[in-house]
Image (spheres, rainbow, N blue to C red):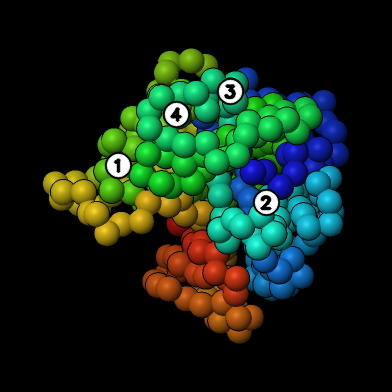
């Protein structure tokens, strides 16, 4: 579930954007961890984030990049018996309808929908087991600023990209011709999701002609834009994390608690 109601995470502005006008797009990311202090220390060193409290209590924090809320942290993995992981949230106009659609199509609802005024949230899994969240309501203040301070994009690693695109498209209203919906295109063997012209998500299942790989553990991977990929990789290792793979454009990292994510070159965005 979301670790804080995004609309309450920043100063109020006159331009309040809701999921009724920007729906189906990624709108927030959250991390479940075991150790709040260690998590804050690691991501502060790695990404320069600062922190402030969240409305849900002492186990929760909001990460700030240049004063803009970019992510939520919930140190509840052990207490709530949840996996340590980064989770993306997608904007929906109606959380109950989205959950019903997911269930009808073979997905599962792990948590919710629950009310977090002024909105509602739920934690779901697609039919291949990849976890994601949905949010109905007002979006984080200064929405366009969040889009540029937040992840470069998110990527779903799954067994069948086209099947996954159909599942998410039917739940989140992708390519529905409704104003504000996300556009879906097939490029280079990937499903590419765009919101207002920006690439916000990709769905990948390997080579286009290859059969679905049963060894793939479907999951959403969060990509954070950084100026120095190699420097981030060394910083991660120095502060107790690990490097799973690395090239000039991106590195897949694991934080000390075990959560996996990617840092991507800002110039490659």
Q: Is residue 110 left or right of residue 163?
A: right
Q: Quadrant of the N terminus?
A: top right
**Residue annotated with mark 4:** 103
Question: Is any atom of residue 73 visible in this view?
Answer: no
For label 1, the SS is: helix
Q: Nearer the viewer, mark 3 or mark 2?
A: 3
Image location (x, y in percent) of residue 130: 43, 47
Which numbered tag is attached to residue 77?
A: none
Question: Is any atom of residue 201 visible in this view?
Answer: yes
Gap in angstroms between the C-alphas marked 2 and 4: 27 Å
Gap in angstroms between the C-alphas marked 3 and 2: 24 Å
Circle 4 packing at 10 Å, graded few (<14), some (14-19), many (20+), is some
Q: Nearer the viewer, mark 1 or mark 4?
A: 4
**Mark 1 vs mark 3: which is more N-terminal?**
3
Residue at (61% x, 48% y) in the render: 29
Q: Nearer the viewer, mark 1 or mark 3?
A: 3
Is 94 or 114 nearer to us in this picture? Answer: 114
Circles 1 and 4: CB atoms closer than 8 Å: no
Q: Nearer the viewer, mark 2 or mark 4?
A: 4
**Residue annotated with mark 2:** 71
Q: Is residue 235 left or right of residue 205?
A: right
**Mark 2 vs mark 4: which is more N-terminal?**
2
Image location (x, y in percent) of residue 256: 60, 74
Circles 1 and 3: CB atoms closer than 8 Å: no
Q: Residue furthest bottom?
A: 238
**Residue annotated with mark 1:** 161
């Amino acid at each position: 579930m979301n670790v804080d109601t995004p609309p309450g995470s920043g100063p109020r502005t006159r331009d309040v954007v809701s999921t009724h006008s920007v729906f189906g797009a990624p709108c927030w990311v959250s991390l479940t961890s075991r150790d709040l202090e260690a998590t804050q220390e690691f991501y502060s060193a790695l990404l320069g984030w600062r922190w402030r409290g969240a409305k849900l209590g002492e186990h929760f924090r909001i990460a700030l990049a240049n004063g803009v809320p970019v992510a939520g942290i919930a140190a509840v993995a052990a207490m709530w018996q949840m996996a340590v992981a980064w989770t993306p949230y997608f904007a929906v106009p109606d959380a109950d309808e989205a959950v019903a659609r997911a269930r009808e199509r073979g997905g599962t609802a792990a948590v919710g929908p629950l009310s977090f005024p002024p909105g509602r949230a739920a934690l779901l899994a697609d039919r291949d087991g990849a976890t994601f969240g949905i949010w109905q309501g007002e979006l984080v203040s200064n929405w366009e600023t969040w889009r540029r301070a937040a992840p470069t994009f998110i990527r779903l690693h799954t067994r069948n990209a086209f099947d996954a695109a159909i599942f998410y498209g039917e739940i989140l209203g992708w390519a529905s011709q409704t104003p504000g919906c996300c556009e879906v295109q097939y490029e280079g063997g990937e499903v590419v999701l765009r919101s207002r012209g920006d690439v916000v998500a990709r769905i990948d299942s390997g080579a286009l002609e290859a059969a679905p790989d049963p060894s793939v553990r479907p999951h959403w991977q969060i990509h954070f834009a950084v100026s120095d990929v190699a420097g981030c990789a060394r910083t991660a290792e120095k502060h107790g994390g690990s490097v799973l793979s690395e090239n000039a454009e991106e590195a897949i990292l694991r934080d000390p608690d075990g959560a996996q994510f990617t840092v991507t070159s800002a110039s490659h965005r």
